[in-house]
Image (cartoon, rainbow, N blue to C red):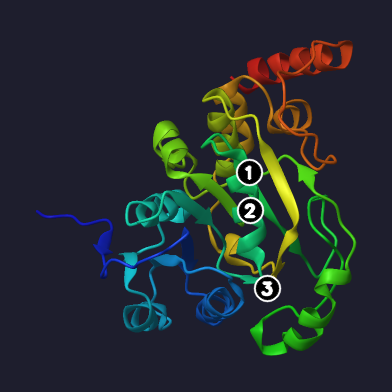
């Protein structure tokens, strides 16, 4: 019996593309349309857009077939790990840009990330844009709360475009949030997203840890590269994996330890990072994580 978990469609080769933009989506058509529209309207450069369609029975698959030359499709939701990996297999650029389907990218968002990459001259980086969100969360890497709408139907696009540049924020450390740019060499070196984290909880910090283990020490959030994030609820529709436990058992430390002591998540940008300093605070966290790991076992 032939089983095709995911099918792939590749269009004609595009010329002069900078990023291959990878977008997973799951029956979220109106958000997806707005994301794609903003990329085409507000980007300075030409990009390849690659979409993975989970299910797509809400009309997403039909719309993608007409509007997006390069896409993959699964009849059921396979989660973001398989989705991003499938889309990446169709990428034509050296540079991958991972983004959610509920982001509206703002003018020249791509220029500021591209400018940062060109300064480095190396594939060893993870560079994020900075999101504006309608409400405050525990994520200190976003500009919030600035409410320009909760969905496409009440989106205050004009107001956002008039004011987004005036919201104060600085470059930050600990890139791992989308939009996220990486080099295809690094993606291939670490094997993309780890599918054991399906449907995707904690696959982001796991990916950052894999990059760290591969030698990446440049994790930058670029303040000038901005997008508006609607914070849609796709994640509430899935049965979540216990990513926190998986991360702890896989790496021997907790995600919070990794974010705080390795990539200095949310702190003012400090350039290339070093190995964690073996100070008393870090040693206490290591001991705590070892105890937690034993208890988890």
Kindly identify which residue carries mark 3.
Answer: 107
| Image location of residue 63, percent across then percent down | 39, 83
Q: Quadrant of residue 143?
A: bottom right
Q: Nearer the viewer, mark 3 or mark 2?
A: 2
- Give the alpha-carbon distance from disc 3 to disc 2, as whole Å: 14 Å
Q: Residues within 10 Å of mark 2 (few under 14, many from 20)?
A: few
Query: Could you tell me if the residues under marks 3 and 2 are in contact, i.e. CB atoms within 8 Å?
Result: no
- Secondary structure category for the residue under label 1: helix
| Image location of residue 27, percent across then percent down | 47, 74
Task: Please indicate, yes or no, whether residue 177 appears anywhere in the rendered image.
Answer: no
Kindly identify which residue carries mark 2.
Answer: 115
- Give the alpha-carbon distance from disc 2 to disc 1, as whole Å: 6 Å
* Left or right relative to 203: residue 149: right
Kindly identify which residue carries mark 1.
Answer: 119
* Left or right relative to 224: residue 19: left
Of labels 1 and 3, earlier in sequence is: 3
């Amino acid at each position: 019996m032939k089983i095709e978990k995911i099918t792939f469609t590749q269009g004609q080769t595009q010329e002069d593309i900078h990023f291959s933009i990878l977008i997973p989506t799951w029956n979220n058509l109106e958000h997806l349309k707005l994301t794609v529209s903003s990329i085409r309207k507000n980007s300075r450069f030409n990009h390849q857009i690659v979409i993975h369609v989970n299910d797509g029975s809400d009309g997403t698959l039909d719309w993608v077939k007409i509007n997006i030359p390069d896409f993959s499709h699964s009849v059921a939701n396979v989660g973001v790990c398989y989705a991003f990996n499938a889309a990446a297999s169709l990428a034509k650029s050296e540079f991958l840009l991972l983004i959610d389907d509920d982001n509206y990218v703002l003018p020249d968002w791509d220029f500021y990330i591209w400018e940062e990459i060109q300064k480095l001259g190396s594939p060893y980086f993870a560079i994020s844009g900075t999101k504006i969100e309608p409400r405050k969360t525990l994520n200190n890497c976003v500009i919030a709360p600035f409410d320009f709408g909760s969905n496409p139907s009440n989106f205050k696009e004009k107001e956002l475009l008039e004011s987004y540049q005036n919201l104060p924020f600085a470059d930050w450390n600990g890139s791992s949030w989308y939009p996220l740019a990486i080099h295809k060499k690094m993606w291939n070196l670490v094997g993309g997203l780890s599918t054991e984290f399906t449907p995707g909880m904690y696959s982001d910090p796991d990916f950052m840890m894999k990059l760290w283990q591969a030698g990446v020490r440049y994790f930058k959030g670029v303040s000038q590269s901005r997008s508006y994030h609607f914070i849609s609820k796709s994640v509430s529709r899935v049965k979540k994996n216990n990513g926190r436990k998986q991360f702890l058992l896989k790496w021997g430390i907790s995600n919070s330890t990794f974010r705080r002591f390795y990539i200095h998540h949310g702190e003012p940008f400090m350039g290339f990072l070093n190995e964690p300093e073996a100070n008393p605070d870090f040693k206490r966290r290591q001991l705590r994580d070892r105890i937690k790991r034993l208890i988890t076992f």
